Amino acid sequence: MKKLSLAVALMFAPTLAQAWPWSQDMANQVSIKPQESVDPANPGMALFPKRSQPVAGTTVIVKDMEAAKKMANPVAADEKSVATGRRLFEIYCTPCHGKSGAGDGFVGERLSLKPWDLTSGSQMHPWNTKDYPDGYIFGYMSLGGAVMPGYANDLSATERWHVVNYIRKTLQKAPAVTAAAQSK
Ligand code: HEC
């Protein structure tokens, strides 16, 4: 019995140690914390103003995929929009989906669930039907998927539509990209 209670006490010892003050000593040392500054000319990040409150509904502006699919693309797919979309796609999407959009990015190759093919070469489903409208791509970007993160915090709604326009006008149109995707 004595042995057993000793074993139980030992089992809980690390848990207890966590609660002891020295478990925070490393964090409480004299050092510059993230967002802090010792240079009066360049102060660190300002605290939020007093009484500021989070504003609801500024990030995800779509309820679910069904709602997203019904959304009409409010941004005309002109040259400027496609160029902005390309820049954003290269920053946010190529690590997984690859430059071609086929899903062969460096990060994507290491995921257990491979990023799906965004080009017209997709084996999974045709992109040019009413089941996959612009709102579907917008919704996926806003909400994320099982593995894919959502981008509603990083990209404004307008920026997301620019990316949709880029995907539509280039990745899903250019024959060279399609051929490359199909040979994979
Ligand atoms: C961390 C890797 C990763 C990043 C970054 C990423 N995706 Fe994905 N994406 C995935 C994976 C994995 C899937 C497969 C579905 C899932 O995760 O649920 C996917 C699926 C999709 C789909 C659904 C495709 C289909 O055939 O139905 C779309 C659309 C999509 N991604 C668009 C984007 C866009 C646009 C970006 C950039 C804003 C992006 N993704 C960034 C990993 C990623």
Image (cartoon, rainbow, N blue to C red):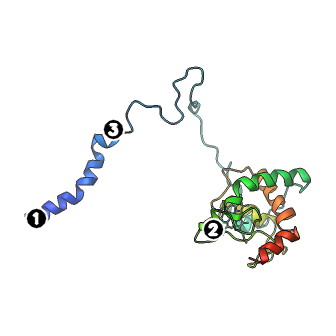
**Amino acid at pointer 3:** Asp
Above or below, 177 relative to 50? below
85, 99: nearer the viewer: 99
**Quarter where residue 162 is shown:** bottom right
Query: Looking at the image, which residue is at 80% across and 73% down?
Result: 180
Q: Nearer the viewer, residue 67 or 8?
A: 8
Gap between marks 1 and 3, in whole Å? 33 Å
Residue 90's x, y, as percent?
Answer: 74, 55
Measuring 10% from the left and 64% from the top, which residue is drawn there? 3
* Residue type indicated by callout 1: Lys
Q: Residues within 10 Å of mark 2 (few under 14, many from 20)?
A: some
Of mark 2 and mark 1, the one earlier in the sequence is: 1
Marks 3/2: CA distance?
Answer: 41 Å
Residue at point 83%, 59% (across, down): 166
Residue hosting label 2: 109
Query: Which SS class for mark 1?
Result: helix
